[in-house]
Structure formats: C-alpha cells, structure tokens
Image: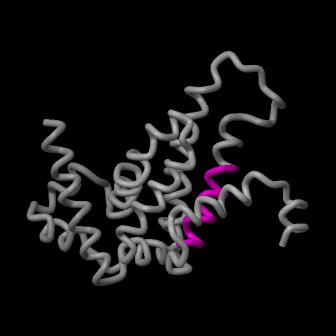
C-alpha cells in the first residue's frame, strides 16, 4: 500500500513538474496534473490538499530527503552539494517555482522544509547538552539557518544558477562561517 502511494505521489510530482516547465504554476489546474499523471482527479486529493502541498512534497522528498543521511553523518558540505545538484538537474522547473509569490511562495515553502529538517537534526544531536543561552533554542537556530540557506537557494535559482553546486556551497560556507564585520571588511 505504501509503495503504491509513493508511486502515485511520484506520478503526480512528475506531471506537475512537466506542466510547470510549460506554464506558470499559478495557472496549472489539478485536472491538468491528474491528466498528465494518468490518474483521476479524486486521487490527487487522496494524496495532497493542493498543488502547493505537492510542491512541498517535491522539495521534501526529492531534494531534502536524499541529503538527510549526509547531514546526520556530519557531511553538511556534501549534503549541500547534493541539494544544489538536484535543483540544478531540474533547472527549468525550479526557475518557474521560484516565481511563486504570496501566501504559497516558493521561498516560504522551501524555508519551512529546510527548517523542519534542521530541527530534526538539532533535536537528534542535542540530547543532554547544556544550552549556551536561553534564547538560543533549537527553533531559533533552525529558523536562522533555514532563512540563510533559503536566501542562498532562491538567489542562486533567480540568478540562473550561474555558478555550480560546489561553488555555491563554498560561497554559502564563506558567508555563514564569518562574522558580518569580517565579510564587510573582506568585500
């Protein structure tokens, strides 16, 4: 049963991505997605609430989930390279997706997805550790890094992915490992 659900999820995702490469995501209907996937419309609603939840599923399952084992193993750079490589392979889709604005913006969806993964990692690694500061909660740390990562991902996509996955990972690491005053001095 789970394998069949996953198969239908993938069919819907692939149909959605194909349609998004041809037209704006706002104009894509559920009927168009189900027609492309070869399933009936009610099937979509058995899997997803709307196309924005489907987009979230794509980001979680096809971009972030494959990188999680690397993150949990402490191989963050490798995870970032994998994430950027995955996005770059579907450049046309993500260039359309990044144009989503408003309540269901791509930026808000990806930030939430990254934040959830980071919270999972932080909670699994922070058992019995003394807090550095009461304000420095797992939620605040996850929000901070999700926001910074989201900025880099969105800016990179909007710029046409002009630099490769390794280089954008190095750029992210450069910014995140230096203080603001260091970066200002070095520019």
Using the image as rendered, state which of residue 24 and residue 174 is in the foreground.
Answer: 174
User: Relative to residue 172, is residue 136 drawn left or right?
Assistant: right
Q: Position of residue 107 (x, y in %)?
A: 54, 65
- In the image, residue 110 above or below residue 132: below
x and y percent of residue 96 in the render?
41, 77
User: At which x and y percent is residue 81?
Assistant: 50, 56
Magenta-colored stretch includes residue 153: yes
In the picture shown, does residue 42 fall above or below 131? Answer: below
Q: Main secondary structure of the magenta part?
A: helix
Which quarter of the rendered picture does the N terminus lie within?
A: top left
Question: What residue is at 16 percent from the left and 40 percent from the top?
Answer: 3
Q: Quadrant of the C terminus?
A: bottom right
What's the residue at 50%, 80% (across, down)? Answer: 160
Residue 159 versus residue 132: which sits nearer the camera? 159
Q: How is the image coloured?
A: one colour
User: Would residue 137 be found to the left or right of residue 152 on screen?
Assistant: right
How many marks the image carries: the answer is: 0
Residue occupying the point 32% across, 80% down: 27
Residue range in magenta is 144-156
Above or below for 141 versus 108: above
Within the magenta stretch, is there residue 169?
Answer: no
Query: Which residue lies most toward the top here?
Result: 128
């Amino acid at each position: 049963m789970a394998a069949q659900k996953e198969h239908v999820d993938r069919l819907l995702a692939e149909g959605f991505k194909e349609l998004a490469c041809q037209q704006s995501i706002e104009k894509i209907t559920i009927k168009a997605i189900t027609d492309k996937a070869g399933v009936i419309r009610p099937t979509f609603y058995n899997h997803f609430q709307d196309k924005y939840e489907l987009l979230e599923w794509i980001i979680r399952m096809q971009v972030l989930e494959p990188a999680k084992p690397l993150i949990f193993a402490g191989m963050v750079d490798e995870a970032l390279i994998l994430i950027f490589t995955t996005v770059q392979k579907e450049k046309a889709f993500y260039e359309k997706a990044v144009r989503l604005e408003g309540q269901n913006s791509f930026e808000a969806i990806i930030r939430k997805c990254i934040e959830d993964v980071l919270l999972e990692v932080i909670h699994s690694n922070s058992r019995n550790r003394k807090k550095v500061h009461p304000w420095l909660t797992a939620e605040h740390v996850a929000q901070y890094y999700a926001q910074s990562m989201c900025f880099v991902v969105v800016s990179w996509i909007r710029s046409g992915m002009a630099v490769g996955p390794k280089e954008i990972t190095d750029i992210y690491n450069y910014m995140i490992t230096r203080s603001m005053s260091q970066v200002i001095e070095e520019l």
